[in-house]
Image: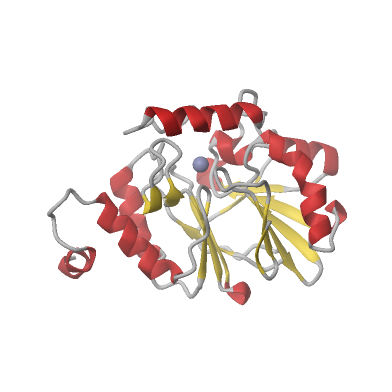
Amino acid sequence: MKIAESIHRLGRDSIVNSYLVEDAGAVTIIDAGLPGLYNDIPRELAAMGRTVADVRGLILTHGHTDHIGYAERLRRERQKTVWVADLDAALARGEVPNPAKGTGPFRLGPLLGFMWWSMRHGGLRIPKVEVVSTFGDGATLNLPGSPTVIAVPGHTPGSAALHFSSLEALFVGDAFATYAVTTGRRGPQVAPFTADAKVALDSLDRLVDVEAELVLPGHGDEWGAGPRAAVEAVRASAQPPGAGTAAARIDDR
Ligand SMILES: [Zn+2]
């Protein structure tokens, strides 16, 4: 599905997102969703006038299984390099347990819907990534679109946002979500399965001034009003009722 000039998303819905970004005829993939999305890659690339041969690499925003999805298959079968932050490399390789505990609040209907969606997309057996290349905060990756890395720890220790300045696009992974797979709630909010919500909220300071129009999360639809408004909405949604407006809270800091 076409999201913007040069940006496509795999799959028919936005429950678990995997993005294709084109620059000068070459492609960077952001997140590998679940294994079942692998079969959608050639068709989506064809819609962009490209093929798998044009893919230069896959960047994981973090090491959770619902983002590494088809990464190992793409690496092994098509010899594509898989990138992840150094702090999440062990998680992507399956060497350490998921730092997030439990689901947090949930509603049975949406949660069962997510589990059913995952099952149908190969979510029961997600191969760990055997080999990853790593990056640190502030790196500019030598991949199509020259994305710059902004570390946003909290969801996982090595969570990273990727800024494509030439496209005015910011991929945030699960730094926040616009759809909660566990509750069905829409709008910018702390993502489910976040290891440390307080650290995640603090990390959003790093995104506020990023020059981008389009914000693309790991779960949910794209947000077209820039990172500052998205971050304010996340903070507002994280407050207990009656605790004041997001703007007031930001001024207090
Ligand atoms: Zn996720």
- Residue farthest toward the top in the current orientation of the protein: 124
Instruction: Report the side of 239 relative to 67 (left or right).
Output: left
Instruction: Report the side of 248 relative to 5 (left or right).
Output: left
Q: Position of residue 106 (x, y in %)?
A: 35, 32
- For the point 59% across and 41% down, the residue is 67
**173 vs 122: above or below:** below
Q: Position of residue 250 (x, y in %)?
A: 22, 66
- For the point 52% across and 28% down, the residue is 115
Q: Quadrant of the C terminus?
A: bottom left
Depth check: give the residue in front, 150 or 123.
Answer: 123
Depth check: give the residue in front, 94 or 216.
Answer: 216
Residue 94 visible? The answer is no
- For the point 59% across and 36% down, the residue is 92
Q: Quadrant of the N terminus?
A: bottom right
Give the quarter of the image for residue 39: top right
**104 vs 244: above or below:** above
Depth check: give the residue in front, 6 or 143.
Answer: 6
Q: Position of residue 145 (x, y in %)?
A: 68, 68
